[in-house]
Image (cartoon, grey):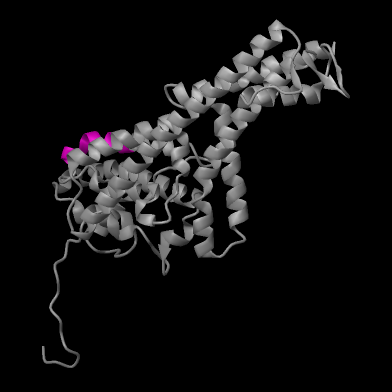
Amino acid sequence: MIPIVASLAGLVILAVVAVDILTTVLGANGRSSISGLIYRGCWNVLRTLARFLPSPSRQSFLSLGAPLMITALIMLWITAVLLGFAFLFAGGVAGEIDGVVTESRTDLPGALRLSLVALSTIGFVEIGPSDRGYSAMVAVEALAGGFVLTLAASYFIGLQQRILERRTFAVQLWARRKEGARPDPDAVEAALAAMLEGVKTYPVVYYVRPQEFEESLPWVLRRLAGATAPTSTGRRMAPSRRLLRSLAETLDAFPDGPGARPPAPLTPEALQAVHEGLHPGGDPLAERFLEGDDGPEKDLHDRYVEWLDHVGFIEAVSRRVAADLGYEDRWTNRGRPHLLPISDPPRLGPKALVLAGADR
């Protein structure tokens, strides 16, 4: 009775791990419920532990999250294969005990050892399968172990490529920002398409958290929110705007809790008051819209609502992702939003220096 129950348990374990591996590595979207739970569980544990560390050490500690998740997932796959075949081997172990060769027997510790020997392909010494059927399963486990390691290696190589593409794009954005230049529309469209496909195929990319804030996902989102906004300068970036929206919606599903929403728009009267300078500093988003808008005044509010639906949503997602990835202390700078100045290039040129007390 015990071998039958153990064999059924082994089949269930192997079936579950096979589905998870194939879905994660070879699936169209790379999303598996098991691997997703592992990623989220590991990240929540790391976030909890990081709260006890000072800020510099916390940033370094959280940057280890993605490598630890990938390692934990691969080890889980290997352990599941090991245990699954160990349960299958229960009742089919033959070996030598106190110099006496035994026949087939129920031996769960021995089955686990037999599974380890088969998976590692180091060869049998004092323990082995009891008949040809179990010998065939030993060969299958050896092949399965090699297959799992091959898929894990290919998964890791593809993941590294996606990470490198994202970091390269972030560095390019930062360099153009320092030069006061707008992002190149063609480069942005290609990079956003690659980032969107990367997050869907390799969800663990979300947890890849560079210590350099300018290479992070929240920074890239916030930087592109204004650059792709539906204004006169952003009209030609309409494809990039749609891709950025899809990327933000995909990222918004990762953090726990309710999703992000754009802020409520001002009424036409309130927007007109800001436009006329009657309420300076009352609504930073409205002021940013008015700074970049040069359309006719008759449909000002309609353009503002369209702009806010895009920029407000992207910024809400970027702020939510930044909080989830532990960038809270990097998000603000002396009480001001750290990312506020980076949506658009500087509009003002250099100002002349005036000596204190000089005649004007």
> Measured along the vertical axis of the image, is residue 292 above or below residue 231?
below
Q: Residue at x 45, y 45 (%)?
A: 208
Q: In the image, is 111 to the left or to the right of 44? A: right
For the C terminus, which image quadrant?
bottom left
Q: Residue at x 17, y 61 (%)?
A: 347
Closer-to-camera residue (79/242) = 79
The residues colored magenta run: 235-244
Residue 344 is left or right of residue 330, and the answer is: left
Quadrant of the frame with the N terminus: top right
Residue 266 visible? The answer is no
Quadrant hosting residue 42: top right
Give whichever of 235, 272 is nearer the camera. 235
> Where residue 324 appears, x then y in whole percent?
50, 48
- Provide residue 266's location: percent of width, then percent of height: 33, 50
Q: Is residue 99 above or below residue 60?
A: above
Question: In the image, is 217 to the left or to the right of 352?
Answer: right
Q: Nearer the viewer, residue 223 or 310?
A: 223
Q: Taking 177 as reference, is 211 left or right?
A: right
Residue farthest to the left?
360
Q: Quadrant of residue 158?
A: top left
Task: Name the residue furthest front.
Answer: 99
Residue 68 is drawn in which quadrant? top right
Magenta stretch: includes residue 132: no
Residue at x 11% of width, y 92% of height: 359
Q: Residue 2 location in percent, x, y? A: 84, 14
Comparing 349 with 186, the one in front is 186
**Could you say where residue 161 lies in the image, as x and y percent from the top left?**
35, 37
